[in-house]
Image (cartoon, helix red, strand yellow):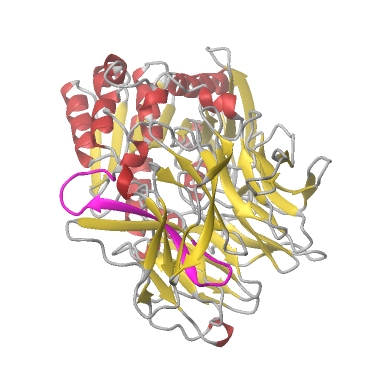
Amino acid sequence: MVLTTSDYGRWSSALTAAEVAGFKVSLAELCSDGAALYWLEARPEENGRVVFVRDDGTSRRDHSPGDVSIRSRVHEYGGGAVCLVPGPAVGAFAYVDQSDQRVWYCGSGAGGAGLQAPRALSVPAPTGWEYRHGGLSATADGDWVLAVREAHPAHGPGRPVRTVRTVVALATRTATPSESTVLAGHDFFGAPRVDASVERLAVVVWDHPDMPWDASSLVVLPLTRADGALVADGEPWTVAGGADESVGQPAWQRNGALRFVSDRRGWWHPYVHAGRRDATSEPVALSDAAAEYHGLDWVLGQATMAELPGGAVVARQTSSGRDAVVRLLPGGGPEMLAQPCVSIAALCAHGKGFALIGGTPDAPSNVWLVEPGAPPRALRPAPVFAGNPAPDTFARGEPFTLTGRSGRPVYGTLYRPAGGGDSGHAEGGPPPLITWCHSGPTSAGQPGLDLTLQFFTTRGFAVACVDYAGSSGYGRAYRNALWGQWGVADAEDCLDAARHLAERGDIDAGRMAVRGGSAGGMTALNALAAGEGFGACTASYAVTDLLRLAATTHDFEAHYTDRLIGPLPEAQELFVERSPLSRAAAMTGAVLLLQGTDDAVVPPAQAERMRDALVAAGTPCDLHFFEGEGHGFRRADTLTACLEAELSFYLAELHL
């Protein structure tokens, strides 16, 4: 069968919207107790419920209570919602209950079986307040669980204030909740980490107006036990960080040294420090490669490095938009380790090797076990599609680089239409394009298999994922290229990438769409408003009014725009000028808006005002609300409806 250009977008695909939605299981917070691996699964088919899973090599089962969803809302984005608790109970763990944001403890019996009834570790919030917890970690003796705590007004709008964001130690051996405040005095704290002797706490701190990837510091606090509580034993001191340095991912090594990452040399590199205040040595870098070993700390508890039993450190290394695993050798370059993943979200030591959460070019994100002398093994079953896709069904990413109108490099990955099997091939012209704008705006595209993306390539669309100015994975200078330019440089880079592909003959310049979520939705809308070729735009939970965002957004991002655009009120005109809401009249293509009703980051009113402005300007616009969804969609029925609506939208507006 030979297909023609008129068939683009309508190819018969083995991937249905419902299957793609159901298989979009998010994996996070991988950890090991030496006997088993554990991780969190967010399941769309259970309305986004997040479950703690245990795999001991012979069986895999849900390890958390059946009526519980585990999720933190610290900084709104959460992270560190679960941790293993060492001690006599095998597989014991602490977790944050999504419904009340308290920390709970669950013991278990022999071999991790027989969960005990959960009991609360954290105290209830005072009247008029709500507590949130995240960044959980347990001490080596299992006596305490450390957590970042936020306090929010229980009623009405309100951001957490400096005096009520703290690091607390929650006792695990008491019958009723018992806790102590270990550290306060900063606007924000990363996930706390205590050394094996329970004498030192390491934690990343930062203050407004900084984001942790702009400027942060790593501090160490001496600890002591007093009257059954874990408390500070002196003042914290700074190991690394400052106004022009981002640090992260502190971890205590077996020899008592402190490992962390810093971008003081332009890339997030791993360093080791003695971890003692009287140490005279400077931190020692474990790599000098032009590569990143860390990512943006949107969530608490990022873990992309691990110490193996012999003392070697393995780490995720990001270079040229691809991830790898390397062994870091003192005094030498990183040694690449064989494993199948090109996109890696987490890594931990396990047994004689390590485990990771990662995606390959051919399979969605999975938990992989990598052991010496054995091939890497995926622990979760691969998706089984009713349409039985052929092996060559999925499009492979082709990296490309161009020089944009700014003179800067622009990085991207092109996915060509790929039907496979009996879908045939197209003749008569290049395919339509969907330009994919990542969120953040300082995030990056992920090269592992994305079933949402493949939903479109298997139907005859080309997809271009653009890592525009500000994207992570290319060093500090590239991240900082978006400072003062958000709403301009990002949109221009996406336009330049699309035009570059059109000039190469890879896509049809007359049938180009652009899409994005959150900050990526703003980028997509502004790219549409430029009037340089895009004919349709899908924007999910998109930032559309920057002044309104600055006035209503949560505390974590309250000053995010200070560097990306400029401080208020001085930059007010720029905020208005760069808001898609102000550019509605310039948008000549059609717009599809997808919005959750419970979005605390970008409230639904923004989507309503954007729709009204577009309609008033005569621009076709559809707005779909999804009840109970927040900033990022999690339910299978929502994800299915969004995919079906987006496909129908492109077929109509790109005249396919």
Taking depth in this image into account, of 198 and 379 the one nearest to the observer is: 198
> Residue 95 at what x, y percent from top left?
42, 67
Residue 146 sits inside the magenta stretch: yes
Quarter-of-image position of residue 71: bottom left
Tell me if residue 334 comes above or below residue 612 in the rendering: below
User: Is residue 501 something one can see in this rendering?
Assistant: yes
Taking depth in this image into account, of 127 and 577 the one nearest to the observer is: 127
Residue that appears at 60% across and 59% down = 195
Tell me if residue 55 comes above or below residue 486 in the rendering: below
Residue that appears at 19% across and 37% down = 605
**The N terminus sits in image quarter:** top right
> Residue 218 at what x, y percent from top left?
55, 43
78 relative position to 584: left or right = right
> Residue 92 at what x, y percent from top left?
51, 76
Taking depth in this image into account, of 636 and 574 the one nearest to the observer is: 574
User: Is residue 507 something one can see in this rendering?
Assistant: no
43 relative position to 333: left or right = left
User: Which stretch appears magenta?
Assistant: 137-160
**The C terminus sits in image quarter:** top left
Taking depth in this image into account, of 265 and 7 the one nearest to the observer is: 265
> Residue 599 at what x, y percent from top left?
27, 46
Quarter-of-image position of residue 70: bottom left
Residue 454 sits inside the magenta stretch: no
Tell me if residue 294 comes above or below residue 627 in the rendering: above
55 relative position to 234: left or right = right
